[in-house]
Amino acid sequence: MSTTPDEPRVDDPRADDRVDEILALLERAGEVDYIGEGVSQLVHALQAADLARRAAADDEAVLAALLHDVGHLCAGPDAPRMGGVGVMCHEEIGAAYLVRLGLPQRVTELVRGHVAAKRYLVSRDSGYLRRLSDASRVTLNHQGGPMSPAERHVFESLPHHEDLLRLRSWDEHAKDPSRSVPDLASYRSLLRICLAER
Ligand code: FE
């Protein structure tokens, strides 16, 4: 079966349905504020993914950047909230959602770990805490605060911990209301490839 450059072959038609579901969720995020920041959830996701692309990150890391906050979007109405700054345990909710859809394990583990990376960096560097946005400092309190030395040791043993630190950096810098980035459709092909491989 032949493929075109823009539309890789997908044997499993259910992959298209899953891609559509993810893109629709993110599309709706264009109307959702990114918890106290100056951009929408969609813009935040697109800027994070664009930073990953510009850093020549691999496809799975780019998708993790695009999807890292999907837990804020897919959580049900009864999910516990962190006051006005998003869904409690959004990293676990988002990772579980992406596991269910069949994203590669590395993508789901990066999504699951992106809050832990913040807790790690805060515990390593007091300057990092000062550089966090106001909203991110508020959520930190709900997320367990800085890691203990024992928690840091566990974090450093994670197979993707270096990737998690890079993702954290893209996350922190993806809040610029003045920056234009490629749109959501530019990630359709990448999502189809990753889901079709499952
Ligand atoms: Fe984020």
Image (cartoon, grey):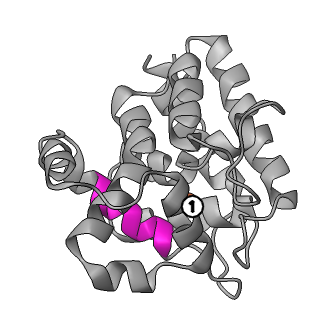
Q: What segment carries the magenta color?
A: 164-172
> Above or below — where is 82 with respect to 125?
above
Amino acid type of the residue that numbered disc 1 sits on in the rendered structure: Thr
Residue drawn where x is 51% and y is 60% of the image? 141
Mark 1 residue element: helix
Residue drawn where x is 62% and y is 71% of the image? 135
> Would you identify the image quadrant in which residue 182 lies?
bottom right
Percent position (x, y) of residue 40?
76, 66
Using a 10 Å C-alpha cutoff, classify the residue at mark 1 as few (fewer than 14 neighbours), some (14 to 19) or many (20 or more). many
Percent position (x, y) of residue 86?
69, 53
> Above or below — where is 182 with respect to 83?
below
Q: Of 120 and 18, which appears nearest the observer?
A: 120
Q: Of 102 and 14, which appears nearest the observer?
A: 102
> Would you identify the image quadrant in which residue 20 lies?
top right
In the picture of the structure, the residue carrying the numbered disc 1 is: 139
Q: Quadrant of the C terminus?
A: top left
